[in-house]
Structure formats: C-alpha cells, structure tokens
Amino acid sequence: MQATVAPNWQQAIFLRLQERDTLEKQHDAVFHHYRKLTEQTRLLKQRNRALLSAAAAATSTSAANAVAGASSPSSSATPANPVQLAYITSLEQQLSTLRDEVATLYKTQGQNAQRLLLMSESHREKEEEARRQSELLAKLQLDYEKLKRQAEDLIHAAGEKDRGIQILQDELATLSLELSQIETRNEDLKKDNASLLQRWLDRMNEEADKMNEGTIWLEEVRKRRESSSPAEERAGVGGDGAASSPSAAKS
C-alpha cells in the first residue's frame, strides 16, 4: 500500500514544479530572440555609421584626388577604398563580438555542466532520502496496522471482560441475595434450635429431678427396710404394695 503512496506525492510535487517552470519560462525564447535582435541591430547601426563615415570620407578623398590629379597627372598611387576598410573593420568587430559570445557560451556551458552535476548529485541524494523515507513510512505503516489490530483485540478483550464482570456482578448479587436469605434462615434455625435445646434441657432437667427424687426415695426405702424388724418389714411390704409409686408415698 505504501509503495504506491510515496511515488504519488513525489509525482505530484514534480508535476507542480514542471508547471511552475513552464509558466515562468514560457517567454524565455522570446526574450532570447529579442536580445539577439537587439545585438544585431546595434551591430548593424555601428556598421552603418562606419559605412556612412567611410562613404563621406571617400567622397572628400575622391574630390581631393581629382584636384591632385589635375595638378599632377603623373601620380600613379591608388589610395585604399575607405568603404572596404570600414566594412572590414565592422566585420572584425562583429567577429570579435562573436568570439566573445562563443567564449561566453563555452563558459556558460561549463557552468551549466557543473550545475548539472551538482543537480544530479542532489537529485540522487534526494532520491536516496526519499527511498529511506518511503521505507521508514512503510515500516511505520506496518507498525500502525499491527498496533491497530492489537488495539482492536484489546478493545474486544476488554468488552469480553466487561461482559464477564457484568455476569459475575449479577451472579454476585444473586449469591448475595441467596446468602442473605440463608443467613436469615440460619438465624431462624438458630432461634428454633435454641428454643428446642432449652425445652430439651428443661425436660432433661425435669427427668433428672424425677430420677433424683426416685433414687432418694428408693434409698430411704432401703434404709428403712434395713433398720426395721421382720414384722415391720412384712407390714412395710404390705404397705408398699398399697403404694404404687414414689409420688404417691411422698404425698
């Protein structure tokens, strides 16, 4: 996914730079031709002025030569043509200007070559930096996707835990209610058991008291039997047959 994202923004920046260069340099050719036309016009004006000066000088020289020829017909020297001299001078100036332009072009070409090398090196460094940034961005994207999945898993796990906690809270509330009911029943049972125990203890105490009374009565009867005479013992036996229970004898 990231491998397509990085070239897209780089391509967009490159296209915008091209649009800017195209917009700023759309009249460069016109300016260049205008400069060349201006330079040629200047040279032509200089040459025309030189030719006009030479023509004027030639006219005056011809007139002077005509007068001199009339006075001395034996003169055979042919003076140089000033127009040709002016034209040669203009051509030499133009040649010198062209040489200067060629030297300037060579110099500019060298500077442009140096700038091209620097721009190529800078472009290579920018491409390397862009590649590293793309790799880093891809790694960060993978880390982001991984962390996003982990966050989603944690959110899902937290939701499951929340549901589990809610279930446990409901069960805890139910168990608390049941425990309260059981404690209430236990309290009731404790009260019932205490009441039953007390009643049982009271009954056991009553039975123990009765048994103690019976034991005391039997002990007294035994003592009386041992201390009485045989006749009294028989009378006592008859009397004992009439008494059916220790409680009757006691009364």
Image (cartoon, rainbow, N blue to C red):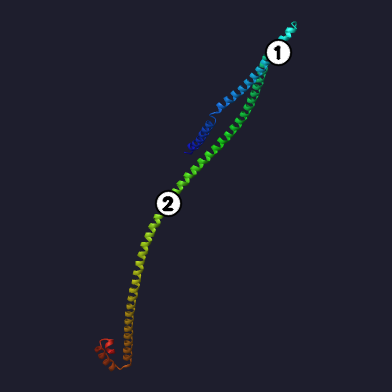
Image location (x, y in percent) of residue 41: 61, 22
Q: Residue at x 37, y 62 (%)?
A: 173
For the point 43% across and 53% down, the residue is 158
Q: Judge whether residue 180 can be spotted in this image.
A: yes
Is 33 or 67 nearer to us in this picture?
67
Q: Is residue 79 visible?
A: no
Q: From the top left corner, tell me how far across and down residue 236 is, in percent.
A: 27, 91
Task: List the residue tagged with mark 2.
Answer: 157
Secondary structure state at the residue bearing disc 1: helix
Q: Residue furthest top?
A: 74
Q: Residue 103, located in which quarter of the rendered image? A: top right
| Residue 238 position by quadrant | bottom left
Instruction: Assign a secondary structure to mark 2.
Output: helix
Place of residue 200 in the rendered image (x, y in percent of width and height, measured from the top left): 32, 77
Q: Residue 224 occupies which quadrant of the picture?
A: bottom left
Which residue is at the front of the view, 183 or 86?
A: 86
Among numbered discs 2 and 1, the one appearing first in the sequence: 1
Residue that mark 1 sits on: 61
Question: In the rendering, which numbered label is found on residue 189?
Answer: none
What separation in Å lies between label 2 and label 1 (alpha carbons)?
A: 115 Å
The amino acid type of the residue labelled 2 equals Ala
In the visual, does 137 lie left or right of 163?
right
Q: Dot 2: within a 10 Å radius of its alpha carbon, few (fewer than 14), some, or many (20 or more) residues?
A: few
Total residue callouts: 2
